[in-house]
Image (spheres, rainbow, N blue to C red):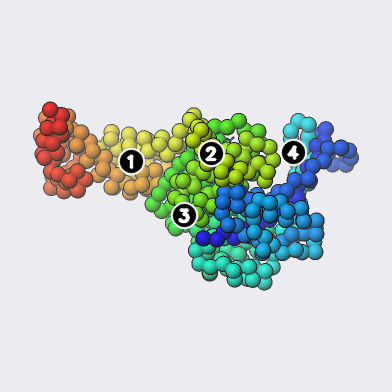
Amino acid sequence: MKILNFGSCNLDYVYTLDHIVAPGETESTDSFDLFPGGKGLNQSIAAAKAGAKVYHAGCLGRDGEPLREIMTQGGVDLSYLRNVDLPNGHAVIQVSRKGENSIFLFAGSNNAVTEAQVDAVLENFSEGDFLLLQNEINLVPYLVKKGHEKGMQIVLNPSPFNEKIAEIDFSCLSYLILNEVEAREISEGSDPDECLGILGKRYPSLKVVLTLGTRGCRYRDGNESLYHPAFRVSAVDTTAAGDTFTGYFLAALADGLSPSEGLRRASAASALAVSRMGAAPSIPYKEEVLAALPDLKPLREHTDPMEEKRKLILDYLESNLKDASLEGLADRLGYSPAYTGNYVKTCCSLPFSKLLQKVRCSVAAKLLAETSESVEEIIYRVGYQNESFFRKVFRERYGVTPLAYRKKMRGDLS
Ligand code: ADP
């Protein structure tokens, strides 16, 4: 499957100064660097270095030629990059000796995309191909609409977050890859779980990848919920961590790998990127990532946040086997019952009622194996009113009747 990244490419003018220039003040400096930048450029280079076939489309300004060279070297196909007679998009960045920075962006060529250009480029792609987008060019809502009409899988990295994101029709997206700040802005949730829950409810078919810096990343679609920790490295520059992650994750999907392998590779690639200075030049090649993976260790202090939530839910169910209810759990968690229902599905991959059955059955199984209480007593203890229902559910889960299960377990033990 092909990847088309319709996105920005920037020139970053970086000046190091004694202090950030205040209004009315003039400062001089001899320290000047020019770097390639822009989320579009970084993500195209990341996906290409990850081994994917990537086409970068967009507009290149009069002074943008060095960017063409850098992307070509990175392995990006620029057949659909259009030259425009405008200054290239750029950022002017002041960095103080204390490490503070102050940035302004000039969109320039990045805002020169036309509908005719979009239509012509999309002609070369077909159903199933990936269309990757960020929020640094004009016409993103149009691209989403047209890409969706063609049946492309649209992957949005809603970054930087601003009011223009609200113009995008999220129901046309296949993947949303975002960081915690963007997730809060878009969902209006407060913690990662709540954000994922809200997004899942609003857009049931959307696959969401949420990156959490040193706390790793989460993935969620209608049926699956995954977590991957960040890898332990000595971080020197976190610029482009998210771009490296996005490019690598998408390259893995385009290569037919599972989301879980995508998270693993993307986490490794972005860990290597943060251990090096710079943006695009810090993005590792696939061979480096695969070679580093066996030695990378997860940042263990950050355990799977879902695991903690799962424990909370299971604790509640186990200690309230007879009268557990969604309302009771909602009360315990401090959420509304509707939100709690969603939350249980996210954390435990089962609706509340099915999860309760599962917990009741497993407690019953434990009692059958470890005590000599009668089946009737056990049924009562775990909260079933209807004996035949319990026997049916138990059989479905364990493949045998409760008594046969007891015999089998005791037999196995003796
Ligand atoms: P963004 O750069 O968009 O804010 P994040 O900060 O969430 O994105 O980082 C993206 C991914 O990069 C994280 O999920 C993690 O895998 C990796 N990462 C970021 N910072 C570090 C770090 N200090 N050490 C190791 N990995 C990191």
| Between marks 4 and 1 in the image, the one whose residue lies nearer the viewer | 4
Residue at numbered disc 4: 101
Q: Residues within 10 Å of mark 2 (few under 14, many from 20)?
A: few
SS label for mark 3: loop
Q: Are marks 4 and 1 in contact (CB under 8 Å)?
A: no
Q: Earlier in the sequence, mark 3 or mark 2?
A: 3
**Residue 365 image-quadrant placement:** top left
| Between marks 3 and 2 in the image, the one whose residue lies nearer the viewer | 2
Q: Residue 114 in the image: state x and y as whole percent.
A: 69, 68
Q: Earlier in the sequence, mark 3 or mark 1?
A: 3
Q: Earlier in the sequence, mark 4 or mark 1?
A: 4
Question: How far apart are the two marked residues, 3 and 1, measured between alpha carbons?
Answer: 43 Å
Relative depth, front residue between 369 and 315:
369
Q: Are marks 3 and 2 in contact (CB under 8 Å)?
A: no
In the displayed structure image, the side of residue 17 where residue 135 appears, left or right: left
Residue at numbered disc 3: 256
Q: Are marks 3 and 1 in contact (CB under 8 Å)?
A: no
Residue located 28% across and 47% down the image: 354
Residue at numbered disc 2: 291
Residue located 44% across and 57% down the image: 204
Question: How far apart are the two marked residues, 4 and 1, measured between alpha carbons?
Answer: 49 Å
Q: Earlier in the sequence, mark 1 or mark 2?
A: 2
Q: Are marks 1 and 2 in contact (CB under 8 Å)?
A: no
Q: Type of residue at label 2?
A: Ala
Q: Type of residue at label 4?
A: Asn
Q: Earlier in the sequence, mark 4 or mark 3?
A: 4
Q: Residues within 10 Å of mark 1 (few under 14, many from 20)?
A: some
Q: Are marks 4 and 3 in contact (CB under 8 Å)?
A: no
Q: Residues within 10 Å of mark 4 (few under 14, many from 20)?
A: some
Q: Earlier in the sequence, mark 4 or mark 2?
A: 4
Residue located 75% across and 45% down the image: 35
